[in-house]
Amino acid sequence: MIIKNIEAKIKLATLLSLGSLITAVIIVISVSFFAYKQVLDARKSIYIMDDANIPMLARQTDVQINREAEYRSHVGRFHSLFFSLTPDDRFMEYQMKQAMYLIDESGALQYNNLKEKGYFNSILSSSAVLTIRTDSIHIDIPRRYFKYYGTQKIDRRSSMITRSLITEGYLSDLEIRSDNNPHAVLITRWKTIENKDIQHAQKNTF
């Protein structure tokens, strides 16, 4: 009878030990999970100081939430730099340099082709002012593809030319943002689909 009582107590102690161990493991896992979640939430939180030096909580947002708008801004900025020019060789050189930060070798290839054809020299010789207006930018997020629609005006001393401009290309994400590429995007495989005159008006030279 005593032996049976001892065996029962041993079984009870074993069950209690196993139960305590399982409970402790569950508690540790739960605490670890919630602690990890809190660390992630804390990393998304930053504090800024207002004018009265009072800390205010600001929330970081997932970069992909607003990525389409950033793609659109990036594409628009590149085309503005590349197609808005004045008869100033230093200004044009600066515009092209800034534009090349936003695109791969496909942009440099088109730039060199235009340069070899005397495009920039013709702007200087005719004192032309080129401006580009963005009409629309289509972004296909899954394919990282874009199509740009714009209207370019070429204002010369004797005439005003209006051109329809359509280009296309792809977008590649970069890991690091910089002053020269604030959206961390690179345009790739860029090409001009259409660049044709839609209006040619002579100016009154009197």
Image: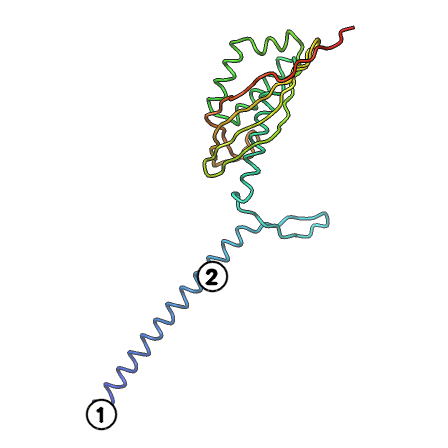
Task: Give the x, y percent position of residue 117.
Answer: 53, 9
Q: Is residue 188 above or below residue 114?
A: below
Residue furthest to the bottom: 1
SS for callout 2: helix
Quadrant of the snapshot with the C terminus: top right
Mark sitting on residue 34: 2
User: For the point 49% across and 19% down, which residue is it?
Assistant: 108
In the foreground, 177 or 150: 150
Of badges 1 and 2, the one in the foreground is: 2
* Secondary structure type for disc 1: helix
Q: Earlier in the sequence, mark 1 or mark 2?
A: 1
Above or below residue 33? Residue 22 is: below
Find residue 10 and report its horizontal and vertical position in percent: 26, 82
| Residue 11 image point, x, y percent | 26, 82
Q: Residue at x 73, y 10 (%)?
A: 203
Tell me what residue is drawn at x 57 percent, y 34 percent. 72
The residue that mark 1 highlights is: 2
> Residue 175: x, y in percent?
47, 36
Q: Quadrant of residue 197?
A: top right
